[in-house]
Image (cartoon, rainbow, N blue to C red):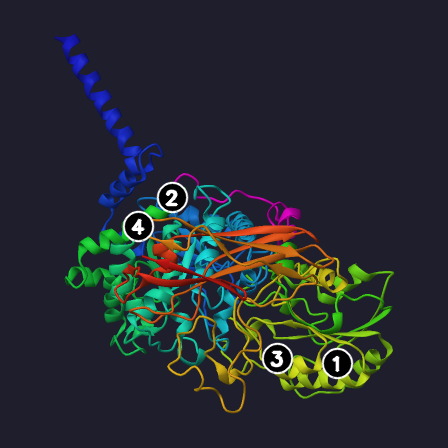
Amino acid sequence: MKKKITLICLSIFLCTATFAQKKETPLYKDAKQPIEKRVDDLLSRMTLEEKVMQLNQFTLGRNDNANNMADPVNDIPAEIGSLIYFSSNPDLRNQVQKKAMEKSRLGIPVLFGYDVIHGYRTVYPISLAQACSWNPELVKQACAVAAQEARMSGVDWTFSPMIDVARDGRWGRVSEGYGEDPYTNAVFGVASVQGYQGDDLSDGKKVAACLKHYIGYGASEAGRDYVYTEISRQTLWDTYMPPYEAGVKAGAVTLMSSFNDINGTPGTANHYILTEILKERWQHDGFVVSDWGAIQQLRSQGVAKDKKEAAMKAFNAGVEMDMMNQCYDNHLAELVKEGKVSEELLNDAVKRVLRVKFRLGLFETPYTPASKEKERFLLPQSLKIAEQLAEESVVMLKNNNNALPLTGVSKVAVVGPMAKSNWHLLGSWRAQGKAEDAVTVFAGLENEFKNKIQLLYAQGCDFDGEDKSGFDEALTAAKSADAVIVCLGEKAQWSGENASRSTLSLPQIQEDLVTELKKAGKPVILLLSSGRPLELTRLEKLSNAMLQIWQPGIAGGNPIAGILSGRINPSGKLSITFPYATGQIPIYYNHRQSARTHQGKYQDIPSTPLYEFGYGLSYTTFEYSDIKLSAHKVKRGDKLIAEVTVKNTGNMDGAEVVHWFVRDPVSTISRPVKELKHFEKQMIKKGETKTFSFEVDLIQDFGFIDGEGKRFLESGEYYVLVKDKKVMVEVE
């Protein structure tokens, strides 16, 4: 009997020990379990209040954005779902994470986000410039570097890429996207997602991507931020949706809702785009975050009377995370109790947030390992990518009488407010970029021409204002030189968020400076740094050559100088149209056909742009063959291959970009005059010929899309176009 009692006690002890062990290690903490089981287990243990807190984002660290205000660290709840992390030191992040892991009941890690738009500390050219490289693989590499620097500094999630199709250069945020074309935004958006996220989000050098701003933000009236947009359903699908659909298919785990009111329903409260399309049609299983303050701003947009109603409308529409609105944390639990938000929808939202955290590996590695700045930032291979991207992004707009490259000159005047500026080369959304890291244009020229060409410097004038006291010094330098390099452009803060401008012209004083320098009678070479397309009609007439260098980031100076010297052959092509005058806006290449092609023109200026989409000069020349097709008649399901050969007929090796367009002259729904469907960039040595090919997907490339998002392909004639070459294909 005593032995039996002992066995029973031992059995009870073992059961108790096993139960205690299970209690100590719940399923959601078991890394060997599938993520979905872990998500479900954790959700089942959460209270209503804990669920709600996972759907809120506050801030942590220094914030240099005047529109934003950081919360004190001590006020951050241990249960908070996410924080925007403004510091570049992981120590502060780890302190807050320790609070979340040890002082919250369930130990759910915080997700740390930040605006890593075009680099973290190694700042690359702005996204609009990146698209001009037509090198998505290089952009993918740049995003991978940004991810590595950010993740090692405590950031798990970037609010990038921005893939808003933008056709109005007055809109400051045009600098953040990839230009005016849907396909281009889709390709570079996918490359960015792949660079940020890689194949494994739990990799300690990868971050979660965020497609923004979903959707139509780039269509804001008159190029102004936050305002109304009128977009037909058909245009929504054929122009604005393609980049987002491609990004979702590429695996982007989050999206950001847009500020703008779309046809009467703001993006932040738009059930059609956030739920019907994104979650139901595209089966996206990540989450949507609001833009900063966008939920509470439903009040100013006239669709919510107070923050509580704003929270209800945004959440029911499909916004899972509240970025700095104080709407969800204050009202969501109450809305659930009142039955105005279903518990089922709440659980789905929390699961989406937790799913991303599990995929990032935050439950296994919640803390960022300590490292020195030199181990994270400005690594040699990172700077090499930065230089190459800056090099390939430069677009040569003009080169009369071979003013470039600079040969046979012994003395060059370098003039203008951008010549020695480092800060403004970084552009907006420079993340943790520092001015002292940047190579200025003048420094690049010194590196390139030392002991070969004497450089004379005079600032001439500031970026704006009316002070012309420096004109005389600049003109004296110009007269003493064999050529004049004039470095003009925009300040970094003149583009980006809340940076709309009424004109694309540079300030009058910069144009006046060029007019003054022209008096020297020497070749004038303009270097133009900006975050948007510029109105250059007057400056074009005053110059012998023009290079659009954009805002090239920290490594721009040396490759720009290399182009000026001829060491580098420019290969950039415009990803956005440069209008003849601001009054032409909107002007873009893939416009619909006109009812009267011989009329409807401007009476006072040309109706064509100064520089069209895809334009860009080289130091060499290329000769294109006629387009060769694998077949001239095809049926649905057939394969079609188009080929063109390009020969370098000049005296210098050069990279050429071939843009493949299609045109459907007659369709049930009218179509653009041409649409980009493929592009390819290859290096071609002098005298060499390369073949470029386009494998046509008949449904995707010849087909079109209706107002319900359904793609259709009609029988009839289609054209494939490359430069001035075109060939007809008949679809039966």
Q: CA distance from mark 1 to mark 2?
A: 54 Å
- Residue density around tag 3, few if under 14, some if 14–19, many if 20 or more, within 10 Å: many
Q: CA distance from mark 3 to mark 1?
A: 19 Å
Disc number lying in front (3 or 1)? 3
Residue 453 vs residue 282: left or right? right
Tell me, yes or no, whether the highlighted magenta stretch contains residue 384.
yes
Residue under pointer 2: 359
Residue picked out by circle 3: 536
Q: Nearer the viewer, residue 28 or 13?
A: 28
Please provide percent x and percent y for residue 37. 27, 38
Residue that mark 4 sits on: 285
Mark 1 or 2: the one toward you: 1
Question: Which residues make up the magenta segment?
Answer: 363-386
Q: Nearer the viewer, mark 4 or mark 3?
A: 3
Mark earlier in primary sequence (1, 2): 2
Tag 3: residue type? Leu
